[in-house]
Image (tube, rainbow, N blue to C red):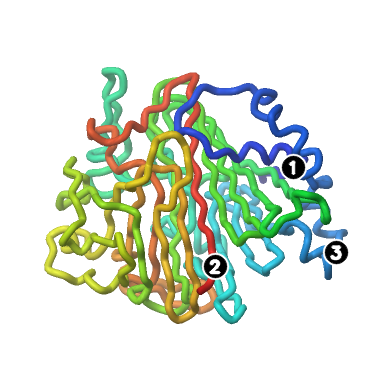
Amino acid sequence: MTPHRSRCFCAAIGARFRMNAPSTPILSPFQRVQPLAMALVFLAACGGDRDAQRHSDPAPKGEAAMRGPPTLTSEPWGVTAEGDTVTLYTLRNRDGMTVQLSDWGGIVTRVSVPDRDGNLDDVVLGYDSLADYLADTAYVGAIVGRYANRIGHGRLELDGAVMELPLNQGPHHLHGGVRGFDRRLWDTFTTVSGPIPGSPFDVPGAGRASVVLSRVSEAGEEGYPGRLETTVTISLTNANELKFGYEATTDATTVVNLTHHDYWNLAGHDSGSVLGHELMLRASRFAPVDREMIPTGEIRHVENTPFDFRTPETIGARIDDEDEQLRIAGGYDHNFVLDDWTGDGALKVAARVRDPESGRVMEVLTSAPGIQLYSANFFAGSIPGKDGATYRARSGLCLETQHFPDSPNQEDFPSTLLRPGEQYRSSTVFRFRTD
């Protein structure tokens, strides 16, 4: 059995979550924290191991609950076949928005957000138990890596050496291989930070709770070169934001492309099709694929195609059009090239989704160059989900912020190379509101 490995650091460690360039020189811990040190003296609020506190400290009430940072608790969730103990974390903010996630695969199991009338619904597809997630093959709610999306024929060439990766989707490599980051237990620590009530920093939306997941992917794991040290910070803020921060370093040249594979349904995970959701993508171009879903290398303009979401359109409006790309994928399963990407790590609006019935709006901001729109085309038949729900094709929507599929084999795509002395960084924010 693996002992529970969560610990709580002071909120100053929360400065690990940064929104900088994907590949930059590594700074020492002192260099990273020094500019924020004085501010964090006033902002930090963290008191010991949160997992111990959950059994002794009452939840904040009244004014404290309204003004304080989100709460964070944990509980045992189950044991894997290998004997690893898995923990489920619950983050809740002052508006009642609740996120549950696990140290197994960084799986987000629940995201409950209010509708226009204040009613909370869970808006991510998922399962009831750890056992269900262990049997899942659709990467539901998980971190995917080392390389999210497809690498054609599992082949990549680095510094003149050809690497052969495991083939786990026909003749191709998908989402990091047979046992990628979604099927690993991560080390964790937790942080809670927020302003002192009444301080100058006590502004609407201030405060966050974070689970910081880390693991070492040894050289050769799933065929990848280099010992990759990875950290993923998942945070809930009082501004109804779910944030993901990705960082990685390597001791040998490798490729990295990390994302989170959530299936969204803003009407509620058990409400059926997402075809009535309205989608806007800040993308004028997309990457066509061949009949095996590998990018052709072309970057095509969306004008006069079913892929034009530059102005809001329902997902179902053109999904069944007579279009070769839609026929190949059975719907949408394509990488869109984000117009506002600058390559300097800045967060830019990438997408906006709206459910007209509930009034929920989800805005996606990212520092990544691309976003994969996937309409859950391959949910064959019916899949038993949590709370008695049944999921069918197009019951959910993925918006996977990422580098492009098969970039290692496409010289005109943005590079996913990571070399020793560099640091991979990527950030994504899912921001919720109502209209």
Occupied quadrant, residue 261: bottom left
Q: For numbered disc 3, what is the local secondary structure?
A: loop
Residue 335 placed where, x, y %? 29, 50
- Residue under label 3, please give it: 58
Q: Earlier in the sequence, mark 2 or mark 3?
A: 3
Q: Is residue 85 visible?
A: yes
- Mark 2 vs mark 1, foreground winner is 2
Label 2, label 1: how many angstroms apart (C-alpha)? 26 Å
Judge from the rendering whether residue 65 lies leftward or rightward of residue 155; answer left or right: right
Q: Residues within 10 Å of mark 3 (few under 14, many from 20)?
A: few
Residue contact between numbered discs 2 and 3, judged by CB atoms under 8 Å: no
For residue 315, above or below residue 242? below
Q: For numbered disc 1, what is the local secondary structure?
A: helix
- Residue under label 2, please give it: 433
Q: Residue at x 54, y 64 (%)?
A: 432
Q: Residues within 10 Å of mark 2 (few under 14, many from 20)?
A: some
For residue 161, above or below residue 328? above
Number of the label disc, if any, that sits on residue 11 = 1
Q: What's under tag 1, amino acid-wise?
A: Ala
Residue 430 placed where, x, y %? 51, 57
Label 2, label 3: how many angstroms apart (C-alpha)? 29 Å
Q: What's under tag 3, amino acid-wise?
A: Pro
For residue 207, above or below residue 116? above
- Mark 2 vs mark 3, foreground winner is 2
